[in-house]
Image (tube, rainbow, N blue to C red):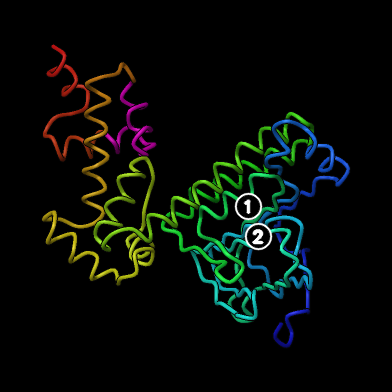
Amino acid sequence: MTEGANVERAHGFQNQRLVVVPRPLVREALTRPITRHLVVTDAGVFPAAEDHGRYRPQGADETIVILCVAGRGWVETAGARSDVGKATAVVLPGGTGQAHAYGAHKDDPWTIWWCHVRGTDAAELIAEAGVRVDRPTIPLAAADRLTAMLDEIITALEKDQSPARLVATSGMVWKLLATLAVDRRVAETGTPLQQAMNYLEERVNGTIRLADLAALVGVSSSHLSKLFREATGGGVLAHHTALKMARARRLLDTTDLTIAQVGREVGLQDQFYFSRQFRRLHGVSPSAYRAERKG
């Protein structure tokens, strides 16, 4: 490890959230049918974590997942140090016995959401994400989805750490790790345009920033915009909106969901904003479209 890697400030940050499941409960959970596969042992969020740092000379028994949503940090594993920026995940496999260290940038400390996980399924899930000891980072195009999952995990464990709660958070963290695996696969398949289009198609109910998507597929924002204009005649966000409206049409045609529910299904929580977007593209309101199609 590099000089200073063993200087630690583990917690105590302003407005932090931190939950630690008592180790006897973790040991019990690892003997039960569901939680033996995955159990969250610790979770939290550290805003602007100045001087944050951890050094573990033998690694950790838990798999560690860190989502950097602002600021900068670093991670060191297998003798190599990597910078970590916004919209990047760090995943450190548990049980390797290999040293690792990570921490906040001195001048621009990171804000991180994080959790520690144990269980028989952890190794397979992080392997599916392409994570190795010497390859611990994953670029993220929509970090807000993942932080929402971690927020749900933290909120659940803040209530209690009962066996039922640990089962619930086991399912939540399985989804989190599976989503990281999908993000890695999308980022490595096809041309940048294909990668970006696939990503948008898989997240019709989400939001996306052009800069984050461009970073995920490895091109500049301007170049990605150019690729989309050449392929679709419009920009990235226009294409994503078109995908949302296509799904909305199918839902209006085939379900009895309310207009507000259809909007939420395509990631537009404000019914009036959804209706305006639909009318702008189709020339009629969602209710009028449904009446025409089903009348």
Other residues around mark 2 within 10 Å, as few (<14) / some (14–19) / many (≥20): many
- Tag 1, which secondary structure? helix
Residue 7 placement (x, y as % from top left):
78, 79
**Callout 1 amino acid:** Ala
Q: Is residue 293 magenta?
A: no
Q: Quadrant of the C terminus?
A: top left
Q: Residue furthest right?
A: 24
The residue nearer to you, when weighing 17 against 246, is: 246
Q: Which residue is mark 2?
A: 93
Q: Where's residue 81, x and y in %? A: 60, 80
The secondary structure that dominates the magenta segment is helix
Which of these two is toward me, 20 or 50? 20
Magenta-drawn segment? 258-274
Q: Horizontal and vertical percent for residue 8?
A: 78, 74
Camera-side residue: 85 or 285? 85
Q: Residues within 10 Å of mark 1 (few under 14, many from 20)?
A: some
Residue most extreme to the bottom: 3
Which residue is at 53% across, 66% downward? 137
> To which quarter of the image does residue 157 belong?
top right
Q: Is residue 102 above or below residue 238?
A: below
Is 238 on the left or on the right of 208, as rendered?
Answer: left
Give the amino acid type for the residue marked by disc 2 in the picture: Pro
- Name which quarter of the figure residue 233 lies in: bottom left
Q: Residue at horizontal 34%, vertical 36%?
A: 266
Element type where label 2 sits in the image = loop
Q: Look at the picture and state if 45 lies above or below 289.
A: below
Q: Are marks 1 and 2 in contact (CB under 8 Å)?
A: yes
Q: Estimate the spatial distance between the alpha carbons at disc 1 and disc 2, rounded to whole Å.
A: 7 Å
Picture mark count: 2
- Vertical arrangement, residue 252 with respect to residue 208, above or below: above
Q: Which residue is mark 1?
A: 123
- For residue 112, side relative to residue 295 (left or right): right
